[in-house]
Image (spheres, coloured by chain):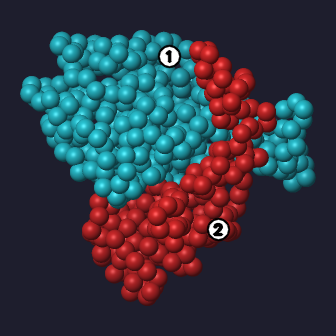
Chain colours: A cyan, B red
Amino acid sequence: MSTQTQYKDLEPDETYAFKPEDLEEGEMILNMGPQHPSTHGVLRIELKTDGEVVNDARPHIGYLHRNFEKHAENIDYQGVIPFTDRMDYVGSMANSLSYAVAVEKLMGIELNERVECIRVIVSELQRIASHLLAIGTYGLDIGAFTPFLHSFVEREKILDLFEWLCGARLLYNYNWVGGVSHDLPEGWTGRAKVFLDQFSPVIEELDELLSHNKIFTARTATVGIIPPELAVGYALTGPNLRGSGIKWDIRKEDPYCGYEKYDFDVPVGQGRYGPIGSCWDRYYVRVDEMRQSVRILRQALDQLPAEGDVHESVPKRVKPKPGEAYGRTEAPRGELGFYVISDGSLIPMRVKGRSPCFVAMSIFHEIAKGEMLADMIAIIGSLDIVLGEIDR
Amino acid sequence: MSLDAAAVQAKIEAKFPGKIPSAELEVVDPFLFVEVDAIVDVCTYLRDDPELAFDMLHCHSAVDYLPPKNPEEARLEVVLHLTSLKHRHWIVIKVKLPRANATMPTLENVWPTANWHEREAFDLFGIQFEGHSDFRHLLLPDDWPGFPLLKDWVWPEEWHGIAVKPTAKMAERAQQGEQIGIGPFD
């Protein structure tokens, strides 16, 4: 028996959310994906279209589902960290940081200032790298090729710094429960400062190249509007929420790793070229956030305490008392939280990953209604989703 | 003005007497249990009351408790992490459900974000949400056997001819020194 025939046994109304008999005259069902260059992974979107206008949309996810939560129930606490790295594979530092924060909260571990400062440095560098990828590929989706090349050159420099720090370029296993895996190598902070000095002008260059380009603003500033109430109802976080004009940042609201010591602003969408909450606003919040990240990095590199063992608080055996904790951090894509429950053994009883991209994707059908087919690409790109994190 | 968990509990108790069977306030993240028959009303109140104003359901998880030593404590729980952007406070609400035929009303009409989270909880735990507008599988294939995050879920041997677990044949080959992984090739 071939697998092909078995797949055909599926109920058709399970595979398709829209049924042919419910279509109005002139409507058709169109599948976008799972293999589509603008979906940044494997995402299938079922569209109900009338000519070029999209009347309704249903995303189908799960193509990358690995169920890391089940894996986590079968390995020890430190062993979960490489799995969290593989959720959002372009922002790994932020994922493992969030998990480490959750377990440390559960166990009541205090960190020394050097570890906290190093964590701030790596997570802000990761934020810049992730936003560079988001901005570069967003331009690419809309049809601007050049900014993509510029942003990837800069991202590469950050990955080089990470490689020097821990040996890996994408999946780091760097933030451990109670510390970090490696101390900063000699000369690393100097190189990081050199990077910041040459990177600051590049933000302005990217800004001139893409942000205020007439074609780009025309494609993005009037589509994909998310009103603030809808954004809160759907629990959007990160740049997607702030693009709708709501000032909400976990680094300010629920500080972790000593973020309260740094001076930075929280950029929000201004509605400069159209209504507030448009694709352009979400895009531009990311550009502004890179500027703020540079500010935080300069302070952190200057304040970095010279003394402090990065393994000082790493427990020999991670064995929390029975209990539960929800730890959250501001990852590049929004609030990334881990809900960890311990039953007192060496293996977590339950680890739930709260993924910002999953939540951002669930609003898609609301904002896709009434837009043109070509705008779907602009909307997906502006939400900055990573399918590895949506599907987990 | 932000409220702590005890104040939130007192407010719910005053409005819905007897609907909080127990609460845990002396832990890292304080939580309140709410009766399943009152959950929609309590959640609507939590969202709409101006002093509470929990406008964001930022995490929705299901948990399976199946302690091997005391089986009478076996249950499913749905855990809601709520945040108020206005007052900058947060609370954890839990709902206890029986492990067999777990059903609870949908919260989609209170916080629209619950839509996908409830589909995920159905996919992985088999919890039914009554009144859900678009109840389909989300993460798993439509014909996946069972609900994988239940503690007593049994691994299928294979799915559509794909080996899900390492088979005896693979173990033999591995014993002979061959480098193999787990995947659709055995």
The x and y percentages for residue A176 are 31, 34
Asked if labels 1 and 2 share a chain, the reply is no
Q: Which secondary structure lies at badge 2?
A: loop
Quarter of the picture containing the C terminus of chain A is top right
Identify the subunit bearing mark 1.
Answer: A
Identify the subunit bearing mark 2.
Answer: B
Horizontal side of A136 relative to B129 (left or right) equals left
The x and y percentages for residue A380 are 59, 35
Q: How many numbered circles are shown?
A: 2
Q: Quadrant of residue A110?
A: top left
Q: Quadrant of residue A296?
A: top left
Q: Which mark is residue A148?
A: 1
> Which residue is painted at 33% across and 28% down in the image?
A174
Q: Which mark is residue B100?
A: 2
- Could one spot residue A379 in this view of the protein? no
Q: Is residue A321 above or below residue A177?
A: below
Mark-to-mark CA distance, 1 and 2? 52 Å
